[in-house]
Image (tube, rainbow, N blue to C red):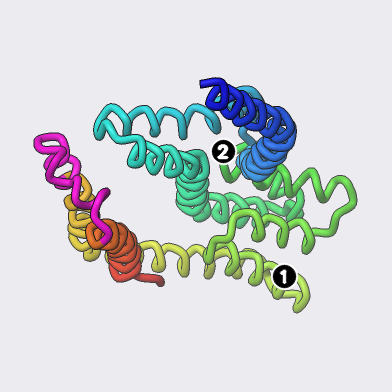
Amino acid sequence: MLIKLVVFLIVFGGAFYLANAGYPMLEEFLKHWHQGRIDKITPRLDEMFLDIPLKKIIMLDILAPLGCGVLGLIITHSLLISAGFLVGGLIIPFLVIKNMEARRKNKFSAQLVDGLTILSSSLKAGLSLQQSIEVLVEEMPPPIGQEFSLVLRQMQMGVSLEEAMYSLKKRMRLDELDIMVTAIMVARESGGDLTVTFAQLIHTIQERNKLVSRVSALTAQGKLQGIIMSILPILFGLFVYKINPKFFEVFFTDGLGKMLFYYAIVSEILGIFFIRKLSKVDI
């Protein structure tokens, strides 16, 4: 009995010492890791002119994985699966930001024709290109008004029009904007009429938007089928696990069962990837 007590105290003392020695290192690692995630999120929010307090960003980055982990535990009652939910929740903030960026780019693209029309009308009225951009900033709502406002501020601070426009193209990454910037630069270097260039750009972008809308309508059914086929196996597995948890015991206890379980997960991920690729048409 005395020997067992001594062994227990030695093991407990060793574990306590290791935990006490390793905790500061773990805390420092987690601090740097979390700060790296925040440093990746905040510049993308700044590019979208979103002034979100740092506390809210940190809360979202912490609560998203925790919420997914708790949800997985409530649904499956399995620590292993809930841990997978928790890890999956780490990408939620980035998915939210990516969705916000995509919506902002689509809105910018929809406003581009109206913005070009304002620029063309202002140039016809005798204004310079910088004055025309000022009119666009005053007349157009965000996001195009915000983006050209930044271009205008850069020009007022001494940045050349070429550098300001290329910065705008780098921020938005749209084919229509790429065409617009290239046309403006070529017209300025060759001495062409910008009003004629803008008129041709408006026609080109309008025709391209028509083609994009038509392709989107034709591929909508395939995208919907892909979403349904991607979600269906997951929902079916959760439904069966909820009704009869013992049905999945073989996947966690047997070696072959574990192999098949991992194979199913990898196959599901690959299936989602290929469905998204096949249902996406680049124009």
Q: In terms of secondary structure, where does tag 1 sit?
A: helix
Instruction: Please give the label number shown on residue 142.
Output: 2
Q: Is label 1 in contact with label 2 (beta carbons under 8 Å)? A: no
Q: Main secondary structure of the magenta part?
A: helix
The quarter of the rendered structure image containing the C terminus is: bottom left
At a point 70% along the width and 29% down the height, the residue shown is 17
Can you see residue 256? yes
Report the front residue among 111 and 2. 2
Which image quarter: residue 41?
A: top right
Q: Position of residue 100 (x, y in %)?
A: 49, 42
Q: Position of residue 261 (x, y in %)?
A: 26, 57
Instruction: Please give the label number shown on residue 185.
Output: 1
* As drawn, 275 above or below 32: below
Point out the stretch of residues depicted in magenta: 236-255
Q: In terms of secondary structure, where does tag 2 sit?
A: loop
Decide if residue 87 is on the left or right side of residue 26. left
Rate crowding at label 2 as few (under 14), some (14 to 19) or many (20 or more) other CA atoms within 10 Å.
some
At a point 59% along the width and 55% down the height, the residue shown is 172
**What's under tag 1, amino acid-wise?**
Met
Query: As drawn, which residue projects farthest toward the right?
Result: 158
**What's under tag 2, amino acid-wise?**
Pro
Q: Position of residue 183 (x, y in %)?
A: 64, 71
Report the front residue among 69 and 6. 6
* As drawn, 251 above or below 219: above
